[in-house]
Amino acid sequence: MSKKKSVFDFHEMKKNGEKVSWLTAYDYPTANFAEAAGLDMLLVGDSLGMCVYGYNSTVPVTMDQCIFHCEAVRRGAPNTFVIGDMPLGSYQTSDEEAVKNAIRFLKESDMDAIKLEGGVRISDRIKAIDAAGVVVVGHIGLTPQSSGQLGGHKAQGRTAEAAKLVVEDALAVQAAGAKMLLVEAVPPEVARYIWETLEIPVMSIGAGPYCDGQLLIVSDLIGQFQAFTPKFVKKYCNVAEIVTDAMREYVKEVKAVTFPDEDKYCYHMVDGEEAKFLDLMRK
Ligand code: KIV
């Protein structure tokens, strides 16, 4: 079993050019598989709202939901660096509220870091959480919690002016004390500029290969999430098909009484007990 990585290891990996593999997880079994597969980091994303609860967006997700899922993931991946995602409403209102909620991730679910969305506009919150001793991961570009302001789930930074704003966000996140940065749905030309400019590790989700590591949503990677598939997603298998086929087969076998096979899937009575039992029932 490999040793759990710390944020210093990710800074070292950046220096050495070793890429970081990062995936979301929301439950115990998935965290178990991810740790066995050798993922460097996990994110208990507020995308759990869409991937697990079936909401239309991440907006309804609460702190308590995040904490419960973080607890399950920690139990499933005790030796992996796990990041808790701060949901909408948990850090926007004040520094005090942001620090209080960030600390909940550490105290109640043993997270190694927290992630929050936003650049320049959220830099005071990053400073406050960092000052409280919590490792902060920034998230800029497409920020799903504020997708209403962005006109939907759209790529960001595609014009020169828009790209400059994304770079300003990246610089603000680093200056505020974040220890890593996630860049979402931004052209590779822009992500590359950020990667070459920043000292902290820069991760990509839909921002191309010029970064220190890649993040994907596990429900996309395994082909479980059905509602839509962003352009940047590569499906490595099709769990929806595999599971639906298995369930279809089960329905067929139950109807045909070919499951359960009496010899294979049943607990028979102890030898000689059946006759005694029938005798007993006759009395
Ligand atoms: O919640 C999440 O999984 C995320 C990713 C979309 C980056 O924040």
Image: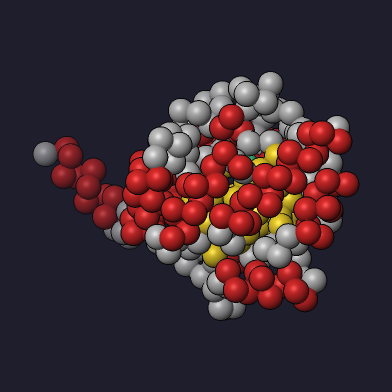
In this rendered view, identify the residue nearer to me: 213 or 238: 213
In the picture as drawn, the residue positioned furthest to the left comes out as 283
Q: Is residue 110 visible?
A: yes
Q: How is the image coloured?
A: secondary structure
- In the picture, which quadrant includes the N terminus? bottom right
Task: Give residue 206's quadrant in the image.
Answer: top right
In this rendered view, identify the residue nearer to me: 119 or 250: 119
Residue drawn at (58%, 69%) of the image: 7
**In x, y percent, where is residue 64?**
36, 41
**In x, y percent, where is residue 11?**
66, 71
**In x, y percent, where is residue 135?**
50, 61
Residue drawn at (22%, 51%) of the image: 276
For ligand 1, which image quadrant applies?
Answer: top right
In-image side of 128 versus 16 (left or right): left
In this rendered view, identify the residue nearer to me: 25 or 224: 25
Q: Is residue 212 above or below residue 216?
A: below
Residue drawn at (56%, 72%) of the image: 6
Q: Is residue 74 visible?
A: no
Residue drawn at (62%, 43%) of the image: 119
**In x, y percent, where is residue 164?**
79, 40
